[in-house]
Image (cartoon, helix red, strand yellow):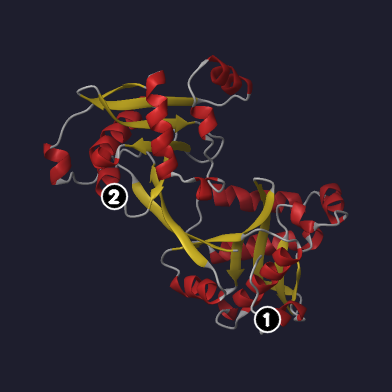
Amino acid sequence: MIAIHKSLSASSSNDHLRPIDARRDLIQVADLIELCFSETIDPDGESYIRQMRNAAKNGPYLQWTGSIKDQATFPTSGFVWENEGRIIGNLTLIPVLKRIQPLYLIANVAVHPDFRRQGIARQLTLAALEYARQRKASAIWLQVREENQAAYHLYKSLGFVERARRSTWYHTRRREYISGPLSNQLRSFIQPAIGWRSNADWMLQEKWLEASYPAELRWQLPIKSSLFKPGLIASIYRMFIDARIQHWSARYQNRLLGVISWQATNHYADHLWLALDSEFEETAAYRLLTYVVEKTNRKRPLALDYQAGRIPQAIQAAGFQLHQTLIWMNIV
């Protein structure tokens, strides 16, 4: 059950706080998100903002969303903070069904720079917690950038607990970008051979994927390891849903050191997923990443999600740049 601080729960009745109305708020919310995240937004975020603005222009579509009894089924559901007819705060609530249990993801918590440090983000978050509690949510999650310590301490004060830190890396394939320096270990260590993944590699790959992308967090990541299985049935299924995935393995003296999976997307970047033997993590990651950069579509950026603080030198040496590190927190 979601825990609510009773002394603050009355904030949901504040005159400035109300549920978002998609029929009239989307333009202002899009403008606010763009303003507040202008320094950190990525191309996928820019696309999301464009979609919001396009939806705001689609009258019949917004009429339909306005008739939905539970606004949480609409992707832009949540709460806004209004001041003299102007939206200066926003919180988006995204409903998720995990193993038949409902939970919510908080996103797009934004407060106009002129109105910060007035408790608006706290009131928006409390409203989201109350909303989730009333719907018997099993948990509510959020992500906060590692450098945003003010937000991090706010969420801790409301009972959120840190669960993980994940870093997103990009390889943009720009010619002017210079790969990072090699560590002494990478300079002098073994040179694994890289080749196509064999069916026999799947057992270890699946085990290592579970370690790198644990089930507790995987629902928030665009990874579905069942698509990585070898075999005819899995191949037919991937063909049916048009999932384009390739795998390469790293070996040294017949020992499997790691597997990398490339997954095509319709977003800004294609995804890479690393499954590595912890004993050879740095070397295997570097060799696999540099190999895939050369072998895949050179016009498409590559995105890698990995545990924060793990093998950063190897990833940088392969030409990847750190985009952001997010702290995943939840309250149950």
Q: Element under label 2?
A: helix
Pick the quarter of the image with the C terminus.
bottom right
In the depicted structure, whether residue 30 falls above or below residue 124: above
Instruction: Give the residue pinned by disc 2.
Output: 312
Name which residue lies at 54% across and 18% down. 235
Name which residue lies at 55% across and 47% down. 44
Q: Quadrant of residue 303?
A: top left
Question: Would residue 257 be seen by someone viewing this image from the given angle?
Answer: yes
Task: Indicate left or right for 93 with 45 as reference.
Answer: right
Front one among 211 and 169: 211
Q: Earlier in the sequence, mark 2 or mark 1?
A: 1
In the depicted structure, whether residue 212 falls above or below residue 67: above
Task: Indicate left or right for 24 with 238 as reference.
Answer: right
Q: CA distance from mark 2 to mark 1?
A: 43 Å
Instruction: Tell me whether circle 2 and circle 1 mark residues in contact (CB < 8 Å).
Output: no
List x then y, in percent, for residue 300: 45, 34
List x then y, in percent, for residue 62: 82, 52
Question: Would residue 304 be seen by someone viewing this image from the given angle?
Answer: no
List x then y, in percent, for residue 282: 25, 42
